[in-house]
Amino acid sequence: MNMFAIAGLLTGLNSAIFGLFVFIHNPTRHLNRVWFILTLTIAAWGFGAFGIALSTGVEAAYHLWKSAFGIGVIWIAVLFLHFVSIFCEIKQKTILVATYSAGAVFSYLAFTQYFFSGVRFAFDSFYYAIPYYPLFSIFVVWWVGTIMYAHSLLVSAYKFSPEPKRLQIKYFFLASATGFIGG
């Protein structure tokens, strides 16, 4: 088992467990439900990466890359922005509808040959996806932009929040920034 597999397995397990813990604590709270779905998409990426790392065939690896992105990675950005909007009490229905719509389009495209053109054996350990350009470049700009925008909302909310909420925002910002940089 390689490090990519171990990282994927740990990401999948930790995300699923943490999300379930928050959801069980208060399943009727909208914030908890969105958090739970966000953690499931992170878990989907983690378990997908685990499968990719252990995959011995080109076709299986190619399918796993498509699935891990179409079900996991793409929706991480969408649901992270949604969660931050609720957490910071920011009403932005139009932006969320646009973000969900873009996520749906990218998710559909992830399962076609126009997102990844195939896989190649890399790092002497697993099959790595070959992005299809220029679509994948557009996706990366949208994904990074969505994550950066969500973090900018956290910074803005921090400035105008009372002290207990500021502490929550600060720790959440640090944790999420670390998670995205590490991921």
Image: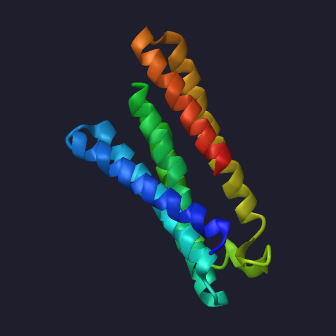
Q: From where the camera sits, is residue 104 visible? A: no
Q: How many marks?
A: 0
Q: Return the x and y of residue 12 as percentages of the image width and height.
A: 47, 60
Task: State the residue at coordinates (67%, 88%).
Answer: 58
In the figure, 19 relative to 83: above or below? Answer: below
Q: Quadrant of residue 102?
A: bottom right
For residue 56, side relative to residue 92 (left or right):
right
Q: Return the x and y of residue 37 as percentages of the image width and height.
A: 37, 52
Quadrant housing the N terminus: bottom right
In the figure, 153 relative to 164: above or below? Answer: below
Task: State the residue at coordinates (31%, 42%).
Answer: 22
Is residue 93 or residue 119 the one in the foreground?
A: 119
Task: State the residue at coordinates (60%, 28%).
Answer: 152
For residue 172, side relative to residue 65 (left or right):
left
Rendering colour mode: rainbow
For residue 34, side relative to residue 181 (left or right):
left
Q: From where the camera sits, is residue 33 visible? A: yes
Is residue 57 or residue 94 the one in the foreground?
A: 57
Q: Return the x and y of residue 55 as percentages of the image width and height.
A: 60, 83
In the figure, 132 relative to 170: above or below? Answer: below
Is residue 73 or residue 51 the one in the foreground?
A: 51
Q: Quadrant of residue 83?
A: top left
Task: State the residue at coordinates (50%, 38%).
Answer: 95
